[in-house]
Image (spheres, rainbow, N blue to C red):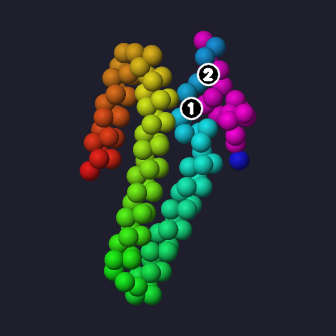
Amino acid sequence: MTTTADSESLPGTEPEETGTPAHHHGYISDKDRYLARLRRIEGQARGIQRMVEEEQYCIDILTQITALTSALRNVGFGLLDDHMRHCVRDAAIAGGEEAEAKFQEVADAIARFSR
């Protein structure tokens, strides 16, 4: 598994001719943490499936669905924050059409995410 320390060896992160590093996704430094959280979420989803199979009480299942939904939203908010702090910030620094495209992209993502 790749860590932040060896991100220089990742494809797409080699320095460009300008001497600035090429872009990488903002979540890369927290990739292991995100994967661990997603694995826990996967376990929660399996637990809910098992609850239905075992015909457990509806409210108990709904409570677990609420917890699962909250966990997914928290991962989403973290990714959105990382995207804004890295991808959008980098595009804003670059300016021009790239910045406008990233601003629109993040606005669209927020609109989808908030539904």
Given residues 12 and 26, the one toward you in this image is 26
Compared with residue 81, is residue 72 higher up or lower down, i.e. above or below? Answer: below
Q: Residue at x 50, y 73 (%)?
A: 46
Instruction: Check the image and name the residue furthest to the top.
Output: 18
Q: Is residue 71 above or below residue 43?
A: above
- What kind of residue is marked 1? His
Give neighbour class at mark 2: few <14, some 14-19, many 20+ (Cα, 10 Å).
Answer: few
Q: Are marks 1 and 2 in contact (CB under 8 Å)?
A: yes
Q: Nearer the viewer, residue 82 or 74?
A: 74
The numbered mark at residue 68 is: none
> Is residue 40 within the magenta segment?
no
Q: Residue at x 65, y 34 (%)?
A: 11
Quickly name the residue at label 2. Answer: 21
Residue at the image position 34 percent from the left and 28 percent from the top: 103
Residue at the (30%, 34%) spot, across then down: 107
Instruction: Name which quarter of the figure residue 91 lies in.
Output: top left
Q: Hey, which quadrant is residue 10 in on the image?
A: top right
The question of residue 12 being in magenta is answered with yes
Question: Which element is circle 1 on?
Answer: loop
Which residue has dot 1 on it? 24
Q: Picture coordinates of residue 13 (x, y %)? A: 63, 29
Q: Pick the residue in front: 22 or 110.
A: 110
Q: Which of these two is toward me, 90 or 55?
A: 55
**Magenta residues?**
2-18
One can see residue 87 in this view: no
Residue 24 location in percent, x, y?
A: 56, 32
Q: Is residue 70 visible?
A: yes
Secondary structure, magenta segment, majority class: loop
Q: Secondary structure at mark 2?
A: loop
Inspect the image, locate mark 2, and give the three-letter code of the amino acid beneath it.
Pro
